Amino acid sequence: MNEHDSERISGLLESDGYEQTSATDDADVIVLNTCCIRENADNKLYGALGNLKELKESKPDLQIAVAGCLAQKDKNLIQNKASHVDVVFGTHNVHRATELLSEARVNGPITEIWDEASDDFEEFASALPAKRESEFMAWLTIQVGCDNNCAFCIVPSVRGKEISRPVEDIVAEAKVQAASGVSEITLLGQNVNSYGRDLSLQERRDGQDVKIRPKFADLLREVGAIEGVRRVRYTSPHPKDMNIDVYQAMEETPTVVPHLHFPLQSGSDSILAAMHRGYTGEKFLEKLALARQTITDLAVSTDIIVGFPGETDDDFERTLEIASAAEFDNAYTFVFSPRAGTEAAEMTEKFCDPDVVQDRYKRLKTVVDRSSLAKNLARVGRTEEVVVEGPSKKDPNFLTGRTVHNKVVHFPVEKFKPGTYVEVKITEARKQYLLGELVRKVASPTYKTKITVEAA
């Protein structure tokens, strides 16, 4: 979500006449777009602002702006700590970025934080111009905010209540993206599979006889049917809200990829209850089994937190059991990090011993790495469709691409532009990636190559 907001801020700046520069010293405007999911986000921000102070002193006309979740949380504290910051704005008023910079040039430093998002859909981040990092992949916001109250999560505080964009707006934007050469769209929301529940409630209030239910499965089908779209992804769903309708839409819509990110967080029922997750370990496995029964060749990734306050050895053993039984293709594992403003941050008397947590983390990594490697080894000998992302960062003799299962594949260099679809035969497997050999080219990218033209 923050990456997508950064694209929108860049798009707004370009629309206002700015050009992107890779050299900080050359910049007229520097925007730090922040996240506050992890504990060290604060240190990173204030460290970066400290490093910019000398540049600001040498270039008084330079404008520094801080945006995003940490700005939404800290508000006036940012300019109190770093008086050289010109503009602070939050998650609900991204559309105001260039206006605030203009106002600050005239009136001096500004902090503008909206407590909640506007109900004007023209002000949604996705309704703004974008400067995408990729020509063939695009984020598409379908919903902002979150109505859950997970004890460890700061998102509801900094992103607000759930607001779903109208289906027709989303489909229209997806069509524009496809027409511009985007072949892979990722639908974004804090809790995507509850998308549309608020729309149903509003329709009911308006007197329509409708069933109050999420509309996410319908949306998947509509976006997946758009001409030019080859792959549809989404992130992130909540297990408590997942149902057979979504699984069926994934199976029946060829462009919706067979990859499910399904955050477990913990395998212990008591810890899940303390987290307010709304499901048990067994219920999680039941929903996961139904997904695999319904969706052909499904890959599954997850998130798991180690050391949530009050986690005992028995609780952790249950997490190991569930993680092992789930056989995830990939897992993002985190040591619990208290975030000010969350319920869990107040559970100080229940904080776990850091040494114990680190040992648990290593043991969990062993389990999830084992299943990741097993899932990847099972793909050796298969031919996979891969979209080329570009040269490998570690070895220029290889290209890097991604399968429909969101698995990274490296294969020997051919002259393919990013966004080219190829078939690759998988020859080797590692825990985090696959190696392969090119079989054939499947499809060329449809976006136009942009070149810089300078006047003579």
Image (spheres, rainbow, N blue to C red):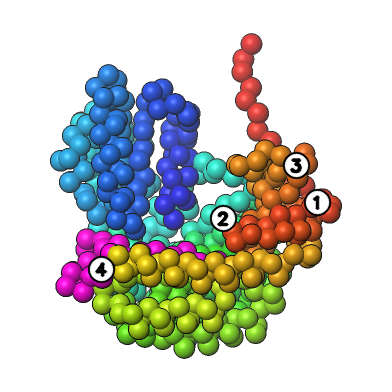
Residue at x-position 21% and y-position 63% = 341
User: How busy is the neighbourhood of tag 4: few (under 14 within 10 Å), some, or many (20 plus)?
Assistant: few
Give the amino acid at mark 3.
Val
Residue at x-position 35% and y-position 64% = 358
Q: Which residues are magenta?
A: 330-354
Measured Cα–Cα span from mark 4 to mark 1: 49 Å
Give the amino acid at mark 1.
Leu
Query: Looking at the rendered structure, which numbered label has been put on residue 438?
Result: 1
Of marks 3 and 2, which one's residue comes earlier in the chain?
2
Residue 23 drawn above or below residue 289: above
User: How busy is the neighbourhood of tag 1: few (under 14 within 10 Å), some, or many (20 plus)?
Assistant: some
Looking at the rendered image, the disc whose residue lies closer to the viewer, 3 or 4, is 4
SS type, badge 2: helix
The reply to whether callout 2 and callout 1 are in contact (CB within 8 Å) is no
User: How busy is the neighbourhood of tag 3: few (under 14 within 10 Å), some, or many (20 plus)?
Assistant: some
Q: Where in the figure is residue 279, as x and y percent of width and height? A: 41, 84
Determine which residue is flagged by label 4: 353
Measured Cα–Cα span from mark 2 to mark 4: 48 Å
Determine which residue is flagged by label 3: 413
